[in-house]
Amino acid sequence: MTDWIDIGPLDAISPRGARVVKTRAGCVAVFRTGDDRVYALDNTCPHRGGPLAEGIIHGASVTCPLHNWVFDLETGIAKGADSGSVATHPARVEDGRIYLDLSQLESRKAA
């Protein structure tokens, strides 16, 4: 079962930008690429806890602002020699609005 919530207009996130969505189930970083694709990942880098929403977005990747780990926005897997991953969450754009599926977050602690 999916639990889609409207988190706002696509235009509220600049191209190659991100924002943090705080939910009762946890914090999620929502990313907008330069070509308007939208991805959602856990906001915390597993390496040193860096806030991924503050990272640099390039193509379909984000670089952690603390130690330069690069994560694939689609899979959440670190690229290159680094090992690690972050959870991904389904996100979609419909009629210019971003929707996030919270069904995977239900068992997590509140933000």
Image: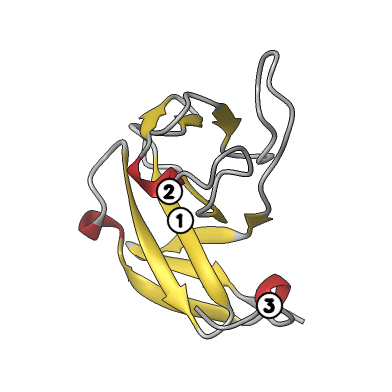
Q: CA distance from mark 1 to mark 2?
A: 9 Å
The structure residue drawn at horizontal position 38% and vertical position 31%, both measured from the top left corner, is 57
In the rendered image, which residue does mark 2 sit on? 51
Q: Please state which of residues 59 and 62 is positioned toward the viewer in this rendering.
A: 62
Q: Is residue 23 above or below residue 49?
A: below
In the rendered image, which residue does mark 1 sit on? 29
In the rendered image, which residue does mark 3 sit on? 108
Q: Amino acid at mark 1?
A: Ala
Mark nearer the viewer, 1 or 2: 2
The structure residue drawn at horizontal position 67% and vertical position 74%, both measured from the top left corner, is 105
Q: Amino acid at mark 2?
A: Pro
| Image side of residue 12 versus residue 67, left or right | left
Location of residue 21 by image quarter = bottom left
Locate residue 92, reporting x and y percent: 51, 59
Q: Is residue 7 above or below residue 53?
A: below
The structure residue drawn at horizontal position 43% and vertical position 74%, both measured from the top left corner, is 22
Locate residue 100, reporting x and y percent: 52, 68
Q: Which circle's residue, 3 or 2, is located before the other in the chain?
A: 2
Q: Amino acid at mark 3?
A: Arg
Q: Is residue 110 above or below residue 69?
A: below
Q: Please state which of residues 95 and 82 is positioned toward the viewer in this rendering.
A: 82
* Contact between labelled residues 2 and 1, with CB atoms less than 8 Å apart: yes
Q: CA distance from mark 3 to mark 2?
A: 18 Å
* Contact between labelled residues 3 and 1, with CB atoms less than 8 Å apart: no
Locate residue 51, reporting x and y percent: 43, 48
